[in-house]
Amino acid sequence: MEQNKEKDLFTFESVMEKPKRMPAKYVGGQEYELRHANGFIKIYNQKGITYVSEQVKNDNLLPDWKLHISVHPKDEPKAFNIIKELFFSPRYPKLILMKIKYGAWAKFMYGREITIYMYTHQKEYEDNGVTEMSKSLERSEKFWFRLVGEIEYLFDKAQIRPNVGGLNPGDYPLGKHVSLRNEAFVNPPKDWKPPKGMYWFGWDYDNLGIKCFVYPPNDLGWNSTNHKCPLNLKKWDLVKWKKVAQRNHNWNKIKKQISNSFSSEIKLFVLFIIILVIFRMLSFLI
């Protein structure tokens, strides 16, 4: 009799079952934790915590590149579970943090329901003595292209819909679901007023007339601080990378079928040997 598989505590359904549960597991030598707080479900390792901390220490002014994924509210559980599997996949090592919004969502944020953080190394991390945040955590352009292509392929296959309005208008479009944005904080225009549902600290000018920095407004675009983009977007080809994902999934399916078939043949062979041995033993007893 087959033993029951251990329950996956990192699924959307498991989180909703017990929101205060805080599961952890080791993947690729890294411990990952799941937390449900402040309107988000987050999966991260220690480097993800350090990354967010360093951004805050630097007033959120360093490059902060992210993949945003547009998901219809009714499809969020299915979408989260797919992204979670990719996040833990050996095909995409060293991802540090992902999150999905939970509950109410301001309209100006539509199209950013799921976020995957893209680590880019900054000199300031070294200046602050943060040894665990090294350049080795950066992933190649091919890595990100492959990931985006696989997300788009799997979402189409699972019939996951983007949110109302599709991608966020403040992002750079990479597909039907995935977009790119640098969320480094900016000085807002002097006449800027925050959109409904935006919360942050001290968005306005203070009494000395000094500008503060805020989460970049959508109308300032996908890279309002003009930081160097980690991707050469002229090379991006959605059709190509979706085909790559499809080929890989088809090949994995074939390998699994071969493996299962081979396993069955081995089991039959072993059973045959056992029966043969039993008959030989019985023949000696007669």
Image (tube, rainbow, N blue to C red):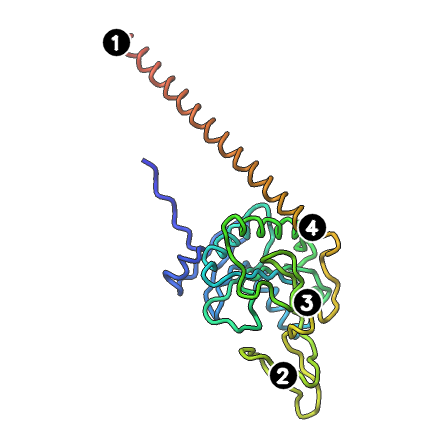
Left/right of residue 221 with respect to residue 258 in the rendered view: right
> What separation in Å lies between label 4 and label 2 (alpha carbons)?
37 Å
Q: CA distance from mark 3 to mark 2?
A: 19 Å
Q: Compare residues 64 and 132 and report the one nearer the observer.
A: 64
Task: Please tell me how crowded label 3 is: few (under 14), some (14-19), or many (20+) other residues with Cα within 10 Å.
Answer: many
Secondary-structure class at tag 2: loop
Question: Label 1, label 4: how many angstroms apart (C-alpha)?
Answer: 72 Å
Q: Residue flagged by tag 4: what amino acid is it?
A: Asp
Q: Which type of secondary structure does the marked residue at label 3 adopt?
A: loop
Residue depicted at 46% across the width and 31% down the height: 260
- Which quadrant is home to the N terminus? top left
Q: Position of residue 146 (x, y in %)?
A: 64, 48
Residue type, numbered disc 2: Lys
Q: Which residue is mark 4?
A: 237
Residue 166: % across, % down: 57, 63
Q: Earlier in the sequence, mark 1 or mark 4?
A: 4
Assign a secondary structure to mark 1.
Answer: helix
Q: Write the residue at 34% across / 37% down.
A: 2
Q: Nearer the viewer, mark 4 or mark 3?
A: 4
Give the residue number, with chain letter if any, for mark 3.
222
> Which of pointers 3 and 2 lies earlier in the amino acid sequence?
2
Q: Residues within 10 Å of mark 2 (few under 14, many from 20)?
A: few
The residue sitting at 53% across, 78% down in the picture is: 197
Task: Say how many tags the image has.
Answer: 4
Name of the residue lying farthest toward the bottom: 207
Q: Which residue is mark 1?
A: 285
Residue 274: x and y in percent read 35, 19
Residue at (70%, 92%) from the top-left corner? 208
**How far is mark 2 from mark 1, CA to CA?**
94 Å
Figure quadrant of residue 189: bottom right
Q: Is residue 172 left or right of residue 263?
A: right
